[in-house]
Each structure stands twice: as C-alpha cells, then as structure tokens.
Image (cartoon, rainbow, N blue to C red):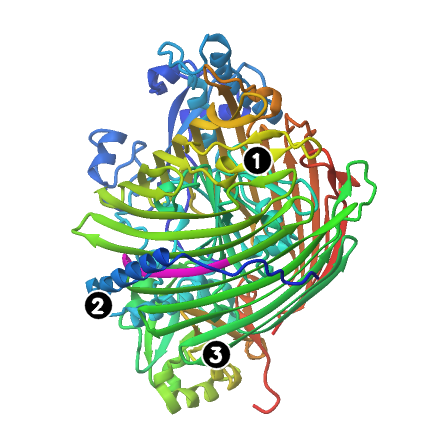
Amino acid sequence: MGPLIKRTQLRPPNADRLRLFRILGATTLFLLLISTGRAQTDQREYAIKAAYIFHFTQFIEWPPEALPNAAEPIRVGVVRPNPFGGLLEEILRDQKVHDRPIEVVDVRTPGDAEGCQILFIPQASGAAGRRLVAELSGSPILLIGEESEFVFHGGMIALVREGSRIGILINRDTLRESNLNASSRLLRLARIVEDRSDS
Amino acid sequence: MFHPTEITPLPIVSGARLRFLRKIASLEFDPPEKFRQTPAPFSSQGYFIWLTRWSPALRQFPPRLENRLKPGLRQGQTPHGRESYQPVEIFPVFVFKLPKKRLPLSQFFVLMENLFHSGRQHFMDTADPFSISSEKPWFSPRAFALVFLTVSLLPAVAFGQVTVEEPRRPDAFPRPEQLRMLTIEELADLTITTPARRPEPIRTTPSAVSVVTAEDINRGGAMNLPDSLRLATGVHVARASNNNWAVGIRGFNLTTTNKLLVVQDGRSLYSPLFSGVFWDVQNPMIEDIDRIEVVRGPGATLWGANAVNGIINIITRSSEETQGLLVSGGAGSVERGYGAARYGGQINENTWYRVYGTGWERDDIVAIDGSSVDDRRRLGQGGFRIDSRPAPETLWTFQGDIYDGRFDRTGLDPIEVSGANILARWTYSNEDDRSLSIQAYYDRVERFIPGTGGEERDTFDVEFQHRFPLGERNDLTWGGGIRISGDDVENSPSLAFLPESRTVRVFDAFIQDRISIIPDRLDLTIGTKLEHNSFTGFEFQPSSRLAWMPHDRHMVWAALSRAVRTPSRIDSDIHTFNPLTGDLILRGNPDFESERLVATELGYRVRPATPTPVTIDLALFHHEYENLRSFEGQDPIILGNELRGRSHGFEVSANYQLSEWWRVTSGYSRLHRRVRAEAGSTDDPAARGAEGNDPRHILFIHSALDAGDHWLFDAVVRHVGTLPNPPVPSYTELDLRLGYRPYDSLELSLTGRNLLQSYQREFGVERAVPRSFFVRAKWDL
C-alpha cells in the first residue's frame, strides 16, 4: 500500500471561513422555529405488535387438537394489563383465518387461557405472567412476550424493541415441545434462539 | 396457507365475457360492437373492455361506480339476478389488435422495435430533426397502445374497490386496517419513530425510482458499488479498465460521465474536477450498506445541479442496526484476498456506535485478448459511525472514513489514492411530516497518477433542510447549503489544469411544496432550486410533478423539470499538450456554460393485490439537452457548448414473488439518443462518439431462490446492447451464486461471475472482464 502523500497544507481562505460561520450562526436560529409535539412512539409500538400477532395467526400451524371445532373462532388471549388499548381488536376485526373468525379475550387465570390459541403476556404483567407461562408450557398455545428473557423462560416468541424497530425472537425448542410449527418465512425474518443450558 | 380475507374470489362471470377472455388468451378476436368503448386515437389499435370480479360480501355501492356499471342497479342486485353478489373490482383491459394469428413472445420485442422506428422516422424524414411538426407526432399512437398492452397483460390488477377505504397519507404511519395489509417483512421494517430525511415510501414517489436492497447486493454476488448498480433498472455499468468504470443513466455514459449525482449518506461523491465520480475509491463496507436508491431522471430541485440524468443514493445502515461483531472474508480467482471486520456496540441506552475495517486486493481485469495484465488493485479502508437518540425526536449521526489504496498499471508506476471524510448530522422530527435537519461534512481526497498528474481536494459542505405542513394541503420543504471545494492540481507535460489551484463555491437554496389537490388522490409537487456557483453564477432548476393515485396500489405520475450540469474544472481549465512539441492540442473554455436539460416524464406504478404479488414500475421519458459540451476548432481545440441532444425511451422494473421461496427481480430499459451540432459549430459528434457510448437496451433478471432452510441459489442474467463508438458488441452474461447458511450467524457462498464467456469486453478498447469465482464466508454474531 502506498504512503499517504502530503503535498501542500490545507488553507481555506479566511473569507470563506467567515461566511461559513455566519451561515452556521443563521441556521441555529431555525431551532427556534420548531414546535414541540407529543411523540407517538408507544401507540406505534403496540400497533406493530398487534399486526405481528395477526401475521402469526397465518404463519403458525396448530395441531388438530388445539382447534377442535371447525366453527370455533381463533382466540387471542391478552393477559392483564392490556397494553393494546383496542388496537388489537381493531386490527383483527372482521379477519378470518382458515374460515374462522378471530376473537380477543381477556385473560386472568390459566382457565381463561385454555381456550386460546395465542396468548400475549405483556411485560407489565410481571410475576403473574411468568406463572402463567410456567403453567401453560407444553400446551399448544403460542406464548408471545415482550422481553428477550421471555423466550428463555418457557416463552416461544418475544417481540422486542430493537432500536427503533420491533424485532422477533423465536425459541424453536419451545415451539416444538408444544407441537406448534412455524413457517420458514417467519423463521427467516426472526432471530432464532436456543435454550440456554443454565435456564 | 390461511387466507384471512373475507372476499372469496369467484370466477369471472360466464357468457359473453367468458368468451372474451378465451379470445384474449388465444389472441384472436372478433369483438362485438357493444364493447367498443375505446377513444378514437386508439380504436384502430384495439379496444377496451371492462372485467369485473364479484364477491359474496354485501356492501354499499359508492355512487360513482353504481352509475358506471348498470344504471338502476340496487344494492344486493347483480346484473344476473343473483341476490347476494356485488362487484368489488372493475378493471380495464385493453385488447390490442393484432394480426389474426398467434403471436409468440419474441414478436413483442419486434413490436417495440417498430414503435421506436416510427418515432425515429420522424427524425429522419424532416429536414430539421428538432422541429416540432404538428401533423406527425414523434410519439406514435402505437406507443400509447403498447403502454396499455403492458397493463393489460398483467395478471388480475385491481382498479377500483367498493370497500370504503380511507386513503392513506403517503408518509404517515399506517392505520390499523392498513397495517394488516403489509407483509410481515414490511412490518419488520417499520420504525416507531420517524427520522427525517427518511425517503418517501417508494410507491408514492412521483419519479422513476428503483431500490437495490442489501439482500439483492448480497445475493447477487456484488462486492463493490458498480457491480451492485448492475442490479438497478436503467443503469449502464461498464468496466473500462483496472480502476475505471463508466456508470450512467439514460445515456451520455463515459468513464467521465458527468450527468449523474452520486451521494452516500448525505455526502456527495462527485468530483468537481470533472463532474463525475471516481468509483475506484468509493468502497463502503458492502455488508453495512442498507440500500441503494436509484432515481432516474432529473432530481435537481432537491438534490442540486448535476442531478441531470439521475441520482444514486447509497445509504448505509445505522449503527443501531449493526451491533455485534461481523467478520467477512474471501478469496477467488481474481480476488486475491478480501477481509472486513466490524464491531458495533452501545455507549449508553440511546447511543450506538460501530467501527469497521476492510481491505482487499484484486486482480480482476484482463487485456481484450484475454491475456493477463499486471493491473492489480489494493485498498484498505476503515471508519466509524455513531448514532445517538437523546430524545425520541432527535437524532445525531457522526461518521467518518479513511482509506488508502494503490492501483498498479502495466508498464507504468501505480496510481496512489488516499482520502478521509467526516460528517455530522442533526435531525429533529416529532411527527411524520415535520422535520429539521442540519448537516456538515469535510472530505479530503488525494490522487497521484505518475506521469499524468495529481489532485488534492478539500471539500466543506454545510446544509440544512426543513419540512413542515402548511395548512391542510401543503407539505413544504425548503433548505439551503453551501459547498466549498478547493483543490491543488499537479500538472504534467501532457495534461494540465490551469490555474493549478481553484476553489469552487456553490450556494444553493431550494423550496418545494407538495400540494394535495384531491387529498391522497392527486398531488402536485412543485419546487425550484436556485444555485450560485463560481463558474456560471445563478442557475435556476424548477420542476413540477403530478401524482395521481386512483387507488392505494396504483400511481400514475407525470413530470416536467429542468436541470443543469454546471461546469467543472475539466470544462474551463483543462489544457492538453503534445508532449513532444509542447503544442496545445485542446483547452477548456473559461466561459463554458452550463449544460441544460428539459425533461418530460410519464410513469405508472402498480402493486396488484395478492395472490399475484407483482410490482411493476414503468417510466417513459423524453429529454432535450442544450449546450452540451462540444469540441470547436483546431489547433487548439477549444471546448464549447454547441451541441444539442434529444433522447427518449422507457424503463420497466418488475418484481415477482413467485412463491414463498422464489423471487424474481427484473429491469429493462430502452434508450434512443441523438446528438447534433448547432449551426456554426465545427464539431462532428457522430464521428468522435460525442459525450457518451450508450447501448440501446439493457436487461437484467435476478432470480433468488431459497432451497430449504439453509440453501440459497441466485442467478443473474445481464444483457447489454451494442455500444456504438468505440464499438463494443452486445453481450449477455450470467452470474451464479450458491449460499449456505448452516446457522443464522454464518453464511458461506460460492459466486461465479461472467460465466458465459471466459472474458468480456464492456467498454473501451483496452480491457476486458474475465470469468471469475469467489468464495466468501460471513460470520455475523
């Protein structure tokens, strides 16, 4: 590789430098023109998560025993406190999966969750949510959470915030243990994690 | 797969309409009179019919559709008396009148050929090819018919939908009902914050845009920027020598092509020395490129002078997205060694950074008879990037690079290059359509060509951009900037820039307004840029673009713009001498004027509904150039502005998602270009191959196939037409790539490029590109 060649010194003329500073000074004035507004990041985050849940209904295959009756709707359970504020209902309204409508139910106890095919456990549900995950592991319910630790403690999918986007973490082992199958298109998009040996 | 829509497609109704469909399929027809609703200029070419699709869902007719279909039709009633069906989609099909025999697909291209011959006939026939003759429009009715042919051959394109659907503002965050229409990949791309300078979603931009994604670059086996650009529609990429490429859009392509603006992360890559780009020193780390946006056509209002024929915008990933360690390396038949490493981390909750280093040594050029030459290139580059988000609405970006390289030349001393740059940008945006950004950068380049000369250049640039809504219907963007570029040139007995040192200053201000004439259906974008530069003083670059969106999935746009190519050092200061006698052969003209372009464009973009996921983008253009650079006189030749040019053509891009694991991207472009000397000029543009060596057509097809969970197979077919002067025959080439991903974090690949010939000449008369193989491993933790 050749050496860095030094020919002449850098010498921008003074007139240019002065003009540069003047313009820089002028542009700082424009900072005053900005009006502040409320950031809408929270709403967007849950809108995207709700849309993900909608896509999961198409990209996950449940075993036949999880969908007993052809007329029964697909149930998406949300553990309290519900962070969606109606967004999930809006996105799932009038949608059908394999000719079944989709219903959103409020979940407090494991009994409520049993009729569901998907269960969303928000971060705010805390210890109650974790207990629910422990009790429902092994049953053919897709467990979706919000923190990366979720997939290491019995959860299957976590929708985590990665910078300014929402990313998907999937634990394939947990999915397999519950007889659930994920489409390769979903797996390609997600980050696959494996069970940690010390979990 | 589940189909969660409630509209169950029914077969198209039987009877007369079904007979029509059958006739279209066999391309023989005998249309009944009652369907001839075609406007007069096209009726000799064919006719329109309307196809309807029926649905069992009960919905309200919107008034306009109700009248159009069958007057007196009530809700719940169909033309055939079946109670519970209603039309949900109506689309026009233009049935093109062809001779009564079957038409093989190859005839389609003959038809296109005829179209342009009839246009060219106009040039040949009239005494003055630039006169406007009213009785013989150069754009024949067949042209319009063929445009519709393209539309009508598409699979089920939805034209209107009965569902009352509130249209979406182009850059607003999608509403819930729109969110569920996005594919899961698009969902993954959505951000919950809106950084400013985020380009509009491509489907709503009223210009001819194509995007080469990081996935395309990786899977297409491209290891440098020019090869990545081969995967964009309408870009002519030709390797001329060891370190020279000719990259052009819509004609006038040379190794010193000057009608293209190239920008990387906000930093202009074009050199004021010759208004072109030194591609050999533009080497961002390939793994960290997010996408390359290619805009065809003038974008002078927003991007400034020299964005005459197009803009190439290279965008690298933010450091938020490049966390962790990535190591990539490879070697091959011409790639003697390639290595890159990047590490990204987090400084605190809101600040991310990355540092990278890359280096390679390549010996990837041969002589035109296939024999090897001693033209080896090596370059090392490193850099960093920091992105910080102290508040949800504020974003700071710092980035810098430094490089050093050497390009060997047979029989001569090697070219030495080095450079460094640093950029800072602050962006504030609190809502979708309100933002402010300020940016400053410094760029230094050094190049030394033993025996010919050398250049050292420093560039300072400061610019700002402010965007805000004005009232209900206006989306205003305005801004300005200054750029100061000073150089020191080292001259040689044969080539000199005089004066040896010059500082070019450009001041610019622009304003652009996007007016919603009919909210979310009809938009008019008008704007202008006003620039003052050291060579020619003030330049004015207005543009207007009209966008009509009859439906969320369709857009028709038209544009009229003016762009300018301001002089560079090569136009005003160049002197070439006969090294033996010292006589002046050619010199530049201090009064060189800006080259001007007036461009008329028309485009159509469609994204049909599933289950036929195809995206088609069509653009037609007509460019008129004035003041093109000419060679005047003898002893010495003095550069002038006495050439005029005219070009027209079209570009079609298509993306087909054939199945979940197979995607095909293709692009075809066609160009007819003519340059003519003004009266009083002594230049002979045809003889010297003036201002560009352009093919009539360029085609690429990229097939990306996922075989199972771990294997990736890609094939790229590329065809470039004949180059006239200096003549280079047309060629077709094939690149194949086999990738293996045993785990998510590791990718191994074997790439073969230019497989069809053992060596391929692309430009010029000295060098050719050989067939090559390359093995690469990429480990992304």
Of residue B570 and residue B170, the one placed in the foreground of this image is B570
Q: Which residue is mark 3?
A: B346
Q: Are marks 3 and 2 in contact (CB under 8 Å)?
A: no
**Image position of A174 with respect to B371: above or below:** below
The residue that mark 1 highlights is B575
Residue B90 position (above or below residue B471): above
Numbered badge on residue A37: 2
- Do callouts 1 and 2 point to residues on the same chain? no
Q: Which chain is home to disc 2?
A: A
Position of residue B573 measured from the top left corner of the image (x, y, whole percent)? 51, 38
Q: Is B471 drawn above or below residue B104 in the view shown?
A: below
Chain for disc number 1: B
Give residue B90's position: percent from left, percent from top. 35, 35
Residue that appears at 27% across and 46% down = B511
Mark 1 or mark 3, which is nearer to you? 1
In the visual, does A171 lie left or right of B126?
right
Task: Give the left or right position of residue B414, taking residue B159 as reference.
Answer: right
Position of residue B79 in the picture relative to residue A188 (left or right): left
Q: Amino acid at mark 1?
A: His
Identify the element where label 2 is drawn.
loop
